Amino acid sequence: MTRLLAVAALLLVIGLVVVAVRAQRTGEDAVALAAPTTPTPVPSPAAGQTAASPTPATPTQAGATGTDAGAPTTPEAAESEPPDHPAPTPTEPPIASPITNPIANEGPHPELRDIDGWLQSEVSSLEELRGKVVVVEFWTFGCINCQRTLPNLIELYGAHSRDDLEFVGIHSPEFAHEADVDNIVAAAADLGVTWPIALDTNKRTFHHWQEGTTAYWPRTYVLDRDGNIRFDHIGEGRYDELNETVARLIADPAL
């Protein structure tokens, strides 16, 4: 019995010691949690030095401002620094010289065949007009297409000296009344045709110059000073090309 009491007393003492130790540790942890953290002291700048300003955050997007990294820069807000050297002033590209198309050369003109006579002319052949640029047109006064070419021909004829340019209208009648000389003279006066007229009553020259099954009114040729065909056109139109060909052949006899 005595021994049991001694063991019980010993266990009681041990339990009290354990409780005391735990209580001490719990108090230390509480004190540690409650104790304030002491800030690390910042060294003050030395005499004569200025404290550096905080470095602003770098924008993360090109053109962004410091307040809104995602906002695009507007022309008014984005002011770039002027370059050290001014940019060179752009120069205009050189203007290319216009390319002038060569004038075709179809060789010597065919001969006139069985011409019945000439009106309004002091010559009786194309050979007498060598040294001049000559416009030759096959026409008949009743042809509406021929009449429509006349305004340009009249203007062209008046624009150049007779020393440089001559016209020959080869009148090849389509109908019998167009073969009458008096009718031709009257029609020429009414239409304003003042240049030489070769009378091709039987249309021999008309078909000789226009070989094949079909011949045309009007058909216009330009001969150079040597009698070579440099322009050939059927019908109306191409007036600018006709006028330019004449002007170039007059201006440059070597063409």
Image (spheres, rainbow, N blue to C red):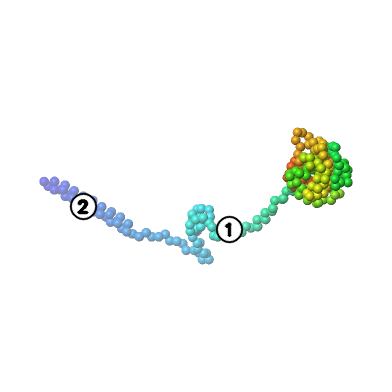
Q: Amino acid at mark 2?
A: Leu
Towards the viewer: 139 or 128: 139
Q: Which residue sits at x=75%, y=35%?
A: 214
Q: Quadrant of residue 103?
A: top right
Return the residue at label 2. Answer: 16
Q: Which residue sits at x=53%, y=55%?
A: 63
> Farthest residue toward the top?
213
What label does residue 191 carry, if any? none
Q: Amino acid at mark 1?
A: Ser
**Residue 237 visible in image:** yes
What label does residue 80 carry, if any? 1
Residue 33, x across and y down, in percent? 32, 57
CB contact under 8 Å: marks 1 and 2: no
Mark in front: 1 vs 2: 1
Q: Which residue sits at x=23%, y=54%?
A: 20
Instruction: Say above or below: 85 vs 138.
Output: below
